[in-house]
Image: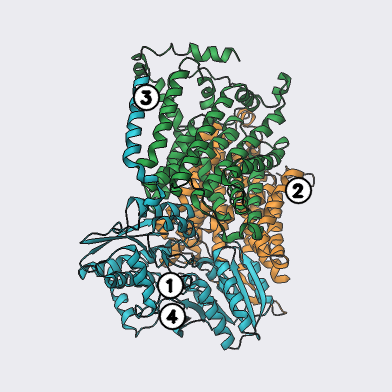
Chain colours: A green, B orange, C cyan
């Protein structure tokens, strides 16, 4: 984790109604964007990218596929986390928006539009849809918003069934895989996913660490009170819906390339539940949580599948344990370790590290 | 037509009861419980196993109910209470995790084959003229559903019930006037487990249950609860029944494939037009 | 000071690129002269099955069949001296895990062929990958035929079974046919069968055509509507649970006509549907892809003995006989291939079966031919009836008219 140099700055979220402990626990993440170690972080990021880029050259196509799946889920979770963690709205239409991306891309590709073009197209379409879905946010809060968006999301998936002439209905449709010249399908898909994932993480990180992220948090924590600060609560909430919808659909387009055959039943609760798990296990409101959460969800399925029914039990139990013991998700565990005496001792041994705390606070001050 | 209505009322009473279970827990413990149907499934499977072992029918019914209550209380004490200070989201996720785990436990212990709860009246039906016959099990579902709703409403008019309402309305104030929120939360979870056990048992004596059935049951339960605004017991119960009948009519006169979409539409309309439940305003000093 | 590691990594990556460039090049897929997963003394096959999740009953049966066959083959010295190593993965009946598992089997476990995998709705997501890797897929359980060089279907598809059932209904004098289908690939099979067979039976008309939701056991309005239409026969394209439920409700409402479901949905030969349906199962018709029912078929009795002795869950179900037979047929095919184990020879030998079929006795003869239609290697289906608490053969194996 590249954010490992600053200690948690005191959270600006002592507002009246923080949505969840997870969010509270991760609220400091926004302040991690100190300037000092920026160069170092950039280098780490580039090295990580280069290593990831090299994977298909050395690993078999199964591992590449698992990594691709992890990255796609990570992208999608960035969007979901933006909505749930950063803007504090429990909108549950994410799986449906993901489906819009998958179907949007598959259908338009069938009509001759190049796959790479369909990625932003599907994203924009889903963003508009997400704003429409988010509109009830004006009236509904918390749990009621969750139920309304859940119902709308399910209705969207139902529509995919009814749109039989376009989508093939419940029986599903084939997806043409986009390939780079003389490169295997798996590797081509992986490269596209890697680029999109890098862009998504880079751009969201910038947005969330900047003014946008802080306003989003303020809207989340202060609610209507933000009005007195001259910020339109409604607008920020809807923008969060739209952005998360955009990201969900982008991930969906990539998912369809991985699955090569899609049908509506893939996008029901059976997808939404793991998506929630990824947000929460990674850490709601944290920056790198989506990656950790996605890796967790894929790894526990892939590498413990010999357990059979016990695996499903383990999945539920691990989820329950994380919720009960680590309200900030796994990323908060990293932070806890880092902030513990052992972690601090480790940090001290690196002379180049700037004095902890001051940097983060400074960054916050000049907002 | 008559058959359609009876079928609708039957499944409607399952939806209504499960909706009531959800609302009861929601009122006292402030948790939207996604594991409710699985809790009922576990209890029912225990009952089915006891019946298979040769125990008399009414003993197995009693055992099912006791398991339902015990499961509810246990879940509250072991998992939920410590999280309640964190708000909705972790609690909601906890119930989702619980539903996954319970479902898998059922699969591991009892397998995934569908089962039914054999009752003395299983397979018996009464002719009502016009070539239409109604299964006794259908009548049992409807009658028990109605009795259950009355019993719960009575309970909430008792002193424990009104304390529970106080907690739901304001936790801090309730504590000030000497209400033990922990005890009430345990009672609510116990009642929730009890109703869930009754619901799934009713479904199992008339139809089949397996590890798949909770998924759709819980969604319809939530639809019913939404119709009651997650607070009104009467609204939830009537909402569940209406939902069941609407479903049957949609299935009969439109298409079975449209049933689910119509249920979703109902949720959405209720939330947008009457977020406090469709009986709000008409309710007479309801709970 | 951070530059150095970066340089090292960059150098390492460049080296790796140079060394292993072939890994991503699409020209280097399998299918060369030496296919993976086969040595002088071992052949590795793989399958993905729904061993957990909602289709676990069928998955366990399918698993038992593969294991019984492999144990038997290995006890008799393997296939031409090669021991069979079967790798079975669990997909939990979810589509994306089917896709992941097939990739794992091919790229990580390096199987020679995929034999008897399940996952009818997830499997189509692997066809493109399999055509890239050239891995033969022998006897997948009941997807539609992708008409692809690598894929061989060994028993009547659901559509073929439904077509045979429609012919049977017509033969029995049924005039009014009702259909209850699930809104997924199961329903598509029924639609194909209806489109193909109904014009051949002008006397018969469809009086009710109901669609139910997948993974939803709310079927009562469909049943009410079907009963109201007063059909002579009902064709089900549903899963086990829904089939049992529909059967119960149909009989509870006094419907006495014929009810048919394909082998998967009807659990022909086993209890996965008739068990939960209880008394209502009397007279229920199930499709037969494999002869799980008769008691005088030596090939079936042989399997039954092995299945009993194995003690595995669902070992005596029809699903088990299916995969048992497919693995046996695979062994026979590999034997016939002789020393040339290349995928080209696999395809050549398999497509030659049209002239010299593999006759196992337990399933219809396997007579694959060249594409486009030849890879549906069996078109015949039988019909069994559940009566007096057991399954009996109602109609022998035959192709749709």
- The answer to whether B271 is drawn above or below residue A138 in the figure is below
Give the CA separation, mark 4 to mark 3. Answer: 70 Å
Q: Mark 3 or mark 1, which has the lower sequence index?
A: 3
Work out whether mark 4 precedes mark 3 in sequence or the reverse, and give the earlier one: 3
Tell me the residue at 38%/12% (across/down): A352
Q: Is residue A102 left or right of residue C229?
A: left
- Other residues around mark 1 within 10 Å, as few (<14) / some (14–19) / many (≥20): some
Disc 2 target residue = B279
Residue A359 lies, in percent from the top left, at: 49, 13
Element at badge 4? strand
Is label 1 in a helix, a strand or a loop? loop
- For disc 4, the marked residue is C391
Task: Give the number of the mark in front: 4 or 2.
Answer: 4
Rendering coords of residue A15 (x, y %): 62, 22
Q: Specify the label residue C6 is tagged with.
A: 3
Residue C135 is situated, as x and y percent measured from the top left of the image, at: 37, 59
Q: Do labels 4 and 3 share a chain?
A: yes
Residue drawn at the location 69% of the way across and 23% of the way down? A226
User: What SS does tag 2 mark?
Assistant: loop
Name the quadrant containing residue B87.
top right
The residue where tag 1 is placed is: C370
Q: Do the residues labelled 3 and 2 touch (CB within 8 Å)?
A: no
């Amino acid at each position: 984790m590249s954010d490992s140099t600053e200690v948690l700055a005191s959270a600006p979220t002592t507002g009246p109604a923080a949505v969840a402990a997870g969010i509270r626990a991760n609220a400091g993440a926004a302040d991690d964007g100190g300037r000092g170690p920026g160069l170092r972080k950039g280098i780490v990021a580039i090295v990580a990218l280069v290593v990831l880029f090299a994977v298909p050259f050395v690993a078999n196509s199964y591992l590449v596929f698992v990594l691709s799946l992890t990255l796609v889920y990570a992208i999608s979770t960035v969007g979901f986390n933006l909505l749930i963690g950063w803007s504090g709205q429990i909108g549950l239409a994410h799986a449906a928006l993901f489906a819009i991306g998958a179907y949007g891309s598959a259908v338009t590709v069938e009509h001759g539009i190049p796959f790479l073009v369909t990625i932003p197209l599907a994203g924009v379409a889903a963003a508009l849809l997400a704003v429409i879905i988010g509109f009830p946010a004006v009236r509904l809060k918390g749990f009621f918003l969750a139920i309304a968006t859940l119902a709308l999301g399910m209705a969207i998936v139902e529509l995919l069934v009814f749109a039989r002439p376009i989508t093939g209905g419940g029986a599903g449709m084939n997806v043409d895989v986009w390939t780079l010249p003389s490169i295997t399908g798996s590797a081509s898909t992986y490269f596209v996913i890697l680029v999109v994932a890098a862009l998504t993480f880079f751009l969201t990180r910038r947005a969330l660490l900047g003014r946008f992220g802080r306003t989003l948090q303020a809207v989340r924590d202060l609610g209507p009170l933000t009005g007195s600060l001259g910020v339109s609560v409604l607008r920020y909430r809807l923008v969060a819906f739209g952005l998360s919808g955009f990201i969900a659909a982008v991930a969906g387009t990539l998912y369809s390339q991985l699955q090569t055959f899609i049908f509506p039943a893939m996008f029901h609760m059976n997808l939404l539940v793991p998506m929630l798990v990824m947000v929460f296990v990674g850490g709601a409101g944290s920056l790198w949580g989506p990656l950790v959460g996605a890796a967790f969800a894929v790894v526990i399925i892939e590498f413990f599948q010999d357990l059979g029914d016990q695996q499903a039990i383990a999945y539920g139990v691990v989820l329950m344990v994380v919720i009960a013991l680590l309200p900030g998700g796994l990323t908060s565990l990293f932070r806890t370790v880092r902030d513990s005496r052992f972690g601090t001792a480790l940090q001290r041994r690196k002379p180049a590290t700037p004095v902890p705390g001051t940097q983060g606070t400074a960054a916050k001050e000049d907002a | 037509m008559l058959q359609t209505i009876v079928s609708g009322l039957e499944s409607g009473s399952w939806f209504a009861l499960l909706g009531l279970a959800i609302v009861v827990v929601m009122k006292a413990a402030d948790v939207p419980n996604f594991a409710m149907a699985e809790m009922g499934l576990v209890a029912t499977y225990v009952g089915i196993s006891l019946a298979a072992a040769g125990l008399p029918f009414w003993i197995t019914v009693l055992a099912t109910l006791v398991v339902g209550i015990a499961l509810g209380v246990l879940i509250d004490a072991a998992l939920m209470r410590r999280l309640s200070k964190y708000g909705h989201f972790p609690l909601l996720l906890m119930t989702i995790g619980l539903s996954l785990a319970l479902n898998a436990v059922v699969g591991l212990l009892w397998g995934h084959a569908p089962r039914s709860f054999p009752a003395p009246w299983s397979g018996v039906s009464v002719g009502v003229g016009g070539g239409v016959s109604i299964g006794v099990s259908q009548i049992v579902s409807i009658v028990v559903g109605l009795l259950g709703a009355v019993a719960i409403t009575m309970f909430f008019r008792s002193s424990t019930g009104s304390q529970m309402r106080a907690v739901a309305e304001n936790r801090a104030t309730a504590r000030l006037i000497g209400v033990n929120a922990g005890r009430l939360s345990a009672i609510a979870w116990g009642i929730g487990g009890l109703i869930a056990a009754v619901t799934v048992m009713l479904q199992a004596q008339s139809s089949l249950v397996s590890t798949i059935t909770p998924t759709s049951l819980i969604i319809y339960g939530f639809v019913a609860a939404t119709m009651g605004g997650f607070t009104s017991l009467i609204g939830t119960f009537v909402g569940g029944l209406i939902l069941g009948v609407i479903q049957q009519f949609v299935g009969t006169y439109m298409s079975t494939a449209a049933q689910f979409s119509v249920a979703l539409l109902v949720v959405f309309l209720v939330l947008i037009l009457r977020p406090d439940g469709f009986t709000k305003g008409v309710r007479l000093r309801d709970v | 000071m951070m530059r150095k590691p970066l340089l090292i990594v960059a150098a390492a990556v460049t080296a790796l690129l140079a060394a292993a460039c072939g890994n991503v090049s699409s020209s280097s897929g399998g299918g060369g002269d030496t296919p993976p997963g086969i040595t002088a003394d071992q052949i590795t096959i793989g399958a993905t099955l729904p061993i957990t999740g909602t289709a676990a009953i069928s998955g366990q049966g399918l698993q038992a069949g593969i294991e019984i066959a492999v144990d038997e083959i290995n006890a008799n010295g393997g296939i031409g001296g090669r021991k069979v190593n079967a790798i079975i993965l669990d997909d939990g009946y979810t589509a994306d895990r089917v896709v992941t598992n097939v990739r794992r089997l091919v790229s990580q476990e390096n199987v020679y062929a995929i034999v008897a995998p399940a996952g009818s709705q997830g499997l189509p997501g692997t066809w493109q990958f399999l055509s890239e890797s050239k891995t033969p897929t022998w006897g997948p359980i009941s997807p539609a035929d992708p008409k692809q060089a690598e894929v061989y279907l060994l028993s009547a598809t659901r559509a073929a079974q439904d077509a045979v059932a429609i012919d049977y209904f017509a033969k029995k004098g049924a005039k009014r046919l009702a259909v209850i289908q699930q809104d997924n690939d199961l329903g598509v099979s029924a639609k194909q069968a209806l489109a193909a067979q109904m014009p051949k039976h002008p006397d018969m008309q469809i009086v009710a055509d109901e669609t139910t939701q997948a993974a939803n056991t709310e079927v009562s309005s469909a049943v009410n509507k079907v009963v109201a239409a007063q059909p002579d026969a009902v064709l089900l394209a549903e899963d086990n649970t829904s089939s049992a439920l529909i059967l119960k409700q149909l009989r509870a409402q006094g419907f006495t006509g014929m009810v048919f479901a394909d082998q998967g949905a009807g659990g022909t030969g086993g209890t996965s549907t008739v068990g939960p349906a209880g008394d209502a199962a009397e007279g229920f018709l199930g499709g037969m892809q494999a002869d799980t029912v008769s008691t005088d078929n030596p090939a079936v009795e042989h399997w039954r003995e092995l299945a009993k002795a194995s003690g595995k869950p669902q070992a005596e179900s029809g699903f088990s006989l299916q995969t048992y037979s497919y693995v046996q047929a695979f062994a026979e095919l590999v034997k016939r291939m002789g020393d040339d184990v290349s995928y080209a020879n696999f395809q050549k030998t398999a497509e030659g079966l049209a002239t010299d079929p593999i006759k196992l006795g337990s399933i219809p003869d396997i007579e694959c031919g060249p594409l486009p239609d030849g890879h549906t290697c069996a078109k015949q289906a039988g019909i069994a009836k559940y009566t007096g608490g057991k399954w009996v053969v109602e109609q022998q194996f035959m192709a749709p008219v």
